[in-house]
Amino acid sequence: MQEIQISKNDFLQKFIGFFNFKVRNEQARAKLKENKYTKYLNYVFLFYAFCVPIARSGISLCLFLIIILWLLEGNLKVKFSLLLSKKVLVYAILLTLYLLISVLWADKTSDKFFDFRRLYYHLTIFALYTSLQKKYIKYLIPIFIFSMLISEVLSYGIFFRLWTLHHGTPSDPTPFMNHLVYSVFLAVTASLLLSQMVLSKNLKLKIFYFLFFLTASTNLFLTGGRTGQVAYIVSIFMLLMFHIKNKLKAILVIFVLLGCMLFVQYQISNTFRTRVAEARSNLSEALYHQDYSSSWGLRLSAWIVTGKILEKNPIFGTSISDIRQDYKHIVLKDKILKNGQFNAIMGNGFHDEYLEVLAGGGLIAGILFMLIFYNFCKIRIRNEEIFNAKIIILSVFIFSLTTDIFLRWQFSATLFAFFLGIFLAQERIEKSVKNKNKSSSAF
């Protein structure tokens, strides 16, 4: 009986050992699959960086692949806990949900979900934050810059009439997007190149970055996008203020550098001279003659309309779905525009992201929107290259949103999502490294 008992025990141990071996194999296989999907996802991130400035269809394809691979990668519980730990994302989600709820008190005739059409381009932020790996992150900004170099070559080719594309003209050489959005891309790119030039220790790279910086800056003033031109000045100002300790010296450097650049661009660019003259004329007509039919005039009229909407609905606004028709109704009813200017409002909104959010969702939406950017500013990054990129993106977008709804257009929404995802991922990676160093030093 004892021998039989021993054999039973041996059998049970072997059976359990075999079962544990199978479990270990399954766990290893699951881990391998997870690593495989993570690797594929990061490859898509690299392709995404290339598509951001030049390919609408590429952006859409990358968005689809990123969502699918992110879900297949697994660890959703961990990912969602990570997402909910970042206030910038929590406030963004709350604002989106609140504006969706505001559709409930919209007029029956409004286009209910018009302003939510392209918000899904921001979904890549979640995937970049949770899944971007340290070894790939350093390639994303250089790939983006390389892609912008291709765009710039095409732009100069259009300007010098070397070729024609389905988009852009010699007077407005924007190869893939409208001049307003392209100017924002060029503002970001030129500022990034200045940062790279300063940080690089390789002389050849410094020369390359300097030459590309000059051509990108010149290209910016060849196009008709005044938004990007002013945003560029703001971003350079903020970069220098952050990095020059002596603030008086920083201000002097800024005035000399930007003064020289603007003087040169004013002399060589007919488009820039024309746009400056138009801006002066537009503002003069709006302020002194109440003529709001120009592009700057329409933006000023939006402030008047927003004030009237908030007088009636200060807390909840008029609903994000009603803002366009309410804008038209108010300018006609209160005669903000003259009779001959009615055609100017057709198809136009507020041309201001802040005002549209305020008018559509009231003070609640306005506070949530401000909290998004406040917590964006609080993202802590030690890597100097990516820290500089954060200053640039914040400077460019905080100003640019006063001129149009860049967070709801495909290219500019993708640009914002791409960089915010990188900043959050870099912060996560740096925290992880810091925690590992702490735990190892404890032993």
Image: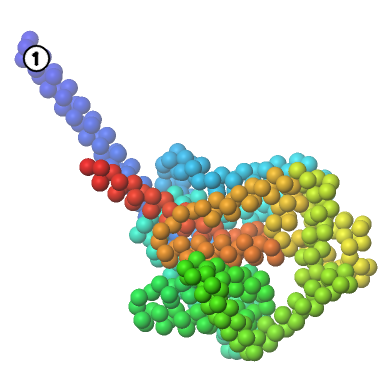
Residue corresponding to mark 1: 4
Left or right of residue 13, residue 380 in this image: right
The count of marks equals: 1
Residue 240 to residue 410: above or below: below
- Could one spot residue 366 in this view of the protein? yes
The quadrant holding residue 236 is bottom right
Image quarter of the C terminus:
top left
Q: Give the residue displayed 79% in from the left and 65% down from the top.
A: 300
Left or right of residue 171, residue 283 in this image: right
- Could one spot residue 33 in this view of the protein? no
Q: Position of residue 253 (x, y in %)?
A: 53, 78
Q: Position of residue 427 (x, y in %)?
A: 43, 53
Residue 18 versus residue 168: which sits nearer the camera?
Answer: 168
Residue 174 versus residue 432: which sits nearer the camera?
Answer: 432
> Element at badge 1?
helix
Residue with the most extreme left position: 3
Please, what is the three-letter code of the amino acid marked with disc 1?
Ile
Residue 313 versus residue 186: which sits nearer the camera?
Answer: 313
Q: Give the residue displayed 55% in from the left and 51% down from the top.
A: 375
